[in-house]
Amino acid sequence: MSDETLNPDALNPDALKMMSFTVFSKLEGAVTAGMIHLGDQLGLYRELADATAPMPVAALAARCGLHERWVREWASNQVAARIVSCDDMADDSMLLHLSPEAKCVLASPAHPAFGMGMFHRLPQTMSALRDMPSSFATGLGHDYDSHGPEGAVGIERSFEPWNQNFLVPVVLPMLDGVVDKLERGCRAVDIGCGAGGAAILMARTFPNSEFVGYDISRHALARAEEKKRVAGVTNVTFLDPRESALPADNSADVIFTFDCIHDMTHPAEMMRSIRACLGNDGTWLLVDIKALDTLEQNVARNPMASLLYGISVLSCMSSAMSAPDGAGLGTLGLPESKARAMALDAGFSRFRRMDVEHSVNAFYEVRP
């Protein structure tokens, strides 16, 4: 670093202030994200959402069985961040409430906008920072089970609200002939099934069909078995592909992959396995993160690009690099152009982007 660089006269003071603001606004976001995690885990949002009128902070603390001083400081962060509403900040009783939109995002697990999944697993995601220097040096990442059981729950809470609302009534009817097959009875496979929410939902909706979910996360499979027991469905089975390999006999009529191909160490090999498993008249529903071809395009058109690239380092790309020869696609590593080219190389001949509105994901119908 040259002396000229450090010379105050060589610096643009406005640019320096803006750089400091930009950097520390990211720190503010990280700290407030931690406060959102606490609000979810401690039941503070749920209590505010259930209230019929603005609630004094002391009453909120009492209802949640918490210490008032700590809740007051938490609430001050939330009000300052414009997440929790306080119409009169001069009132020492601190009357708190959630807007209808905040209730959807913070405290309504059945609503498709519910957003607490990523915040649920925030401690596990951020704890990956301890492992990152080694990964950066060696190139070897860490699989999803390195985030522990709460990591699996966080993924479940992230994606199930949208799936529960839109997968069966909106997405499946857009696939050519798939609903008819499922209603008559067919063999369906969910690869990267996670905690099993989508597979159980479809198994319950289409009792004549048989569903098999595959995942390499022991924590996710344990969640799936428990959810299956609670749901009382008998036409779904969950397997670890390292113990029960995906069949290569073209026996599947429908295959689903939800938000998982970009996380895989060998995605091209997986696509070839999907083609070998799928019948010649079958359908593969490929759902993956909405991405563009270049960094420039992602930065220009996706306001969440920095978040997604960062999550990729801590989670998605780390998983995709968890084998020495991992492909390392990462969160934004499977744009439509690459997904299409890889599918064609794997032996598929038809690839169609579906007109599904989703804030994060792109949906593709892939056929032999």
Image (spheres, rainbow, N blue to C red):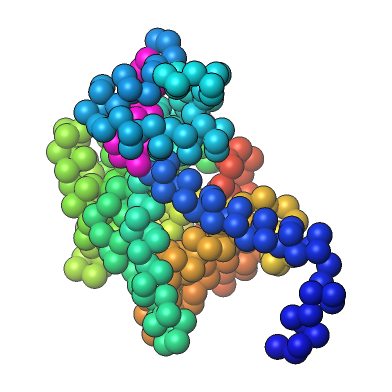
Magenta stretch: give its range.
38-51
Residue 246 in percent (x, y) is at 30, 64
Q: Quadrant of residue 354?
A: top right
Q: Does 149 sit left or right of 278 as displayed?
A: left
- Front residue of 226 and 101: 101
Evaluate whether residue 244 shows in this view: yes
- Residue 17 vertical placement versus 143 (above, below): above
Query: For residue 234: magenta?
Result: no
> Main structural element of the magenta stretch: helix, strand or loop?
helix
Q: Residue at x 18, y 47 (%)?
A: 225
Task: Tell me the quarter of the image containing the N terminus.
Answer: bottom right
Count of residue discs? 0
Query: For residue 46: magenta?
Result: yes
Q: Residue at x 29, y 27 (%)?
A: 61
- Front residue of 145 and 71: 71
Q: Quadrant of residue 149?
A: bottom left
Q: Does 271 sit left or right of 343 as displayed?
A: left
